[in-house]
Image: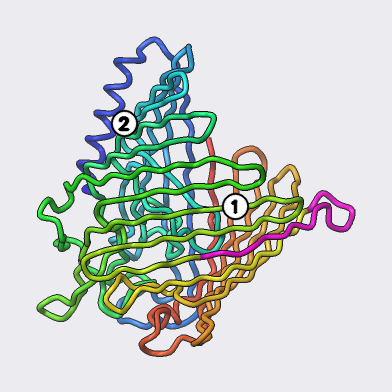
Amino acid sequence: MNPTRTLATVALALTSVWVGAQAEEWEATGFVGLDSRAFWQDERFEGQDDGFNASLHVQPELYWRSDDGRQRVSVVGFGRYDNQDDERTHLDLREAYWGHEGAGWDVSAGFGKVFWGVAESRHLVDVINQTDLVEDLDQEDKLGQPMVNVNLQRDYGRFELFFMPWFRERTFPGVDGRFRSALPAETDNPVYESSDKDRHNDVALRYSHYFGDVDVGAYVFDGTSREPNFVVSDEGDHLIPVYEQMTQVGVDLQYTRDSWLWKFEGIRRETDRDTFNAAVGGLEYTFFGVGGRAADVGVLFEYLYDGRDAGAPPTAFDDDIFVGARLALNDSSDTSLLAGAAIDAETHETFFNVEAERRFGDNLTVDLRLRAFSNAEPGEALYAFEQDDYLQLRVSWYY
């Protein structure tokens, strides 16, 4: 998103909601943080980070709710300054919406974030928001999506309707950044299948409910694919993102029984180029009160399948096994640890991930992250990243 347009949109949103809530109190919160990444292998491509990368990020948040509790406003901005990659220096509106709650229904309009999914290793069914890929390669960070959302809550389930009039393009690391492909992505002139380009009207309808111990979600989405394909530029020095039109149906299931969680996500995507199915499913078993203490240890296992062909947007998870463990000390500092590895069943490409987090006092959190790649050969999905192993320390101050 253009920074000037982002700031103008924030100002307009704040002005509009202030007029409607002039006598009310706002809740201001958020955080500011510093990330430092250490890469211990030489860069694969010329000009990339050569060993150490630092960046500053900030996320201001404003919330308001009317006295009767029926109206609400949420404004969440995000900004990052990166000392190496110009593409990673960016601003975004994560949220900027007004909402109203009625009896058994609610509506919201503006920039919003919606998350769907139950699996740990990959969120296949999460389709509403675009990925902010300059933030992290795990695709967990999302851009705010302009939308109108109408929901109906009934005894037999929840129905959600989304109308999205403006498409957000995916962000990509620049020439100087790590985690990029051999040819960097050029985002200035993407290609769209639709003649409406980024103003195509996307729609989605979702149903969710629970049946005993089973939580069920199902949806249909019709619009611009959040996953781009790529073509090589005429100059042959960069990739151009291509955004196709797609119809996608998805389902997520979670069965809870005692210490067991059984999880499944599946999609079927149809485009003019390809039709394919993809799924991720597995289990999590938790040992509570380990060693007579308050700590819990969860063991995770998932299998990932993706049937797309070579002409579809690329993925590293077409036939993979994920194994991991989760530790929660359940202490006053919210200390937690997640470790896992995704292993390709055929090529043995492996992605290792370790994340640890702890709070110090009421305002400071420290997050330590280790990621590494192995067994990737030329032509395989993770080969471009194989020398991008890194250790990251993130310190965030909440106010």
The percent coordinates of residue 200 (x first, y second) are 18, 48
Name the foreground residue: 178 vs 320: 320
The percent coordinates of residue 289 (x first, y second) are 83, 52
Residue 294 lies in the magenta-colored region: yes
Labelled pair 1, 2 in contact (Cβ < 8 Å): no
Say how the picture is coloured. Answer: rainbow
138, above or below 318, in the image: above
Amino acid of disc 2: Ala
Q: Residue at x 30, y 52 (%)?
A: 90
382, above or below 67, in the image: below
Please identify the quarter of the rendering in which residue 233 is found: bottom left
Does dot 2 land on a helix, a strand or a loop? strand
Marker disc for residue 47: none
Residue 95 lies in the magenta-colored region: no
Horizontally, is 276 left or right of 395 in the view?
A: left
Does dot 1 land on a helix, a strand or a loop? strand
Please identify the quarter of the rendering in which residue 166 is found: top left
211, above or below 16, in the image: below
The percent coordinates of residue 187 (x first, y second) are 21, 62
Amino acid of disc 1: Gln
Q: Residue at x 30, y 77 (%)?
A: 47
Q: Residue furthest right?
A: 292
Which of disc 2 and disc 1 is earlier in sequence? 2
Give the alpha-carbon distance from disc 1 to disc 2, as whole Å: 29 Å
Q: Residue furthest bottom?
A: 378
Q: Residue at x 35, y 73 (%)?
A: 308
From which residue to which does the magenta span run? 280-295
The percent coordinates of residue 206 (x first, y second) are 41, 43
Which residue position holds label 1? 254
Which residue position holds label 2? 109
